[in-house]
Amino acid sequence: MSGAPFSVRASRSERILFVRFRLHPKQLLRQAWLRLRQLRDAPHAVAGGLAIGVFWGFTPLTGLKTLLSIFTAWITRCSKIPAVIAVTLHDILIPVWPIILRWEYDLGFWILNRPHRFPPKLGIGKIHMSELLQWKTLGVLWPTFVGSVVIGVPIALVTYWIVKWALERYESKHHRHLTPPA
């Protein structure tokens, strides 16, 4: 029997898939922007969908972010694809995500407590995996969610304004032939 039972060379689709995973975050953002520009929707709807995805991306609801962003985009009649793209782009933040979650928790803890105070220092010995599925988790999740709303809303609003402005500018420059004569 000559030859190996499997091919040593990767097929073209496997090489393309491998190359896509090696993209730099800057290239990922560029590709996402190119996809957003190609959507055939109003700039308001695309910018709204992106802002919704950015907002839900900051929340600590890990398994529900994409579903909540699609549902919110559907309710507000914004584009769902940009909402999913924005939630997915939060995966770039994975190396710094624990720091962001800690900031959200600190801010939410400070807002929810009267008189205002910051939470106690978190030690590594205080975290036990067996406690994650108990009701104590809600005591950590609620302040983190409140902090994520305080951080996520302004960033989502800024995202909305910037993307809407950029899309309107792009359309005015590249789609002049579509405007009716005056």
Image: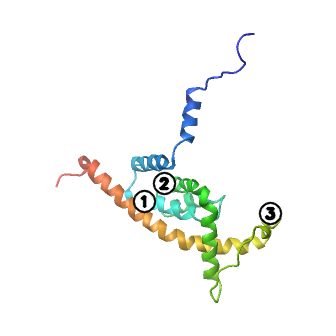
Using residue 1 as the reference point, say whether residue 72 is left or right of it: left
First of labels 1, 3 by sequence position: 1
Q: Please identify the quarter of the rendering in which residue 84 is found.
A: bottom right
Quadrant occupied by the C terminus: bottom left
Circle 1 Cα neighbour tier, 10 Å, few/some/many (<14 / 14–19 / ≥20): many
Determine if residue 77 is in view.
no
Q: Residue at x 80, y 63 (%)?
A: 129
The amino acid type found where label 2 is placed reads: Pro
- Foreground mark, 2 or 3, reads 3
- Dot 1: element: helix
- Dot 3: element: helix
The amino acid type found where label 3 is placed reads: Met
The residues bearing labels 2 and 3 have C-alpha atoms spaced at a distance of 35 Å
Residue 144 point in image, percent of width and height = 64, 71
Question: In the orientation shown, which residue stands out farthest toward the left?
Answer: 182
Image height check: is 132 above or below 106? Answer: above
Q: Which residue is mark 2?
A: 82
The residues bearing labels 1 and 3 have C-alpha atoms spaced at a distance of 39 Å
- Count up the numbered dots: 3
- Foreground mark, 1 or 3, reads 3
Circles 2 and 1, Cβ within 8 Å, touching? The answer is yes
Using residue 105 as the reference point, say whether residue 33 is left or right of it: left
Q: Which residue is mark 3?
A: 129
Q: Which mark is residue 34?
A: none
The amino acid type found where label 1 is placed reads: Ala
Residue 167 point in image, percent of width and height = 36, 55
Q: Residue at x 72, y 10 (%)?
A: 2
- Dot 2: element: helix
Q: Which residue is mark 1?
A: 47
Which of 77 and 87 lies nearest the eye of the viewer?
Answer: 87
First of labels 2, 3 by sequence position: 2
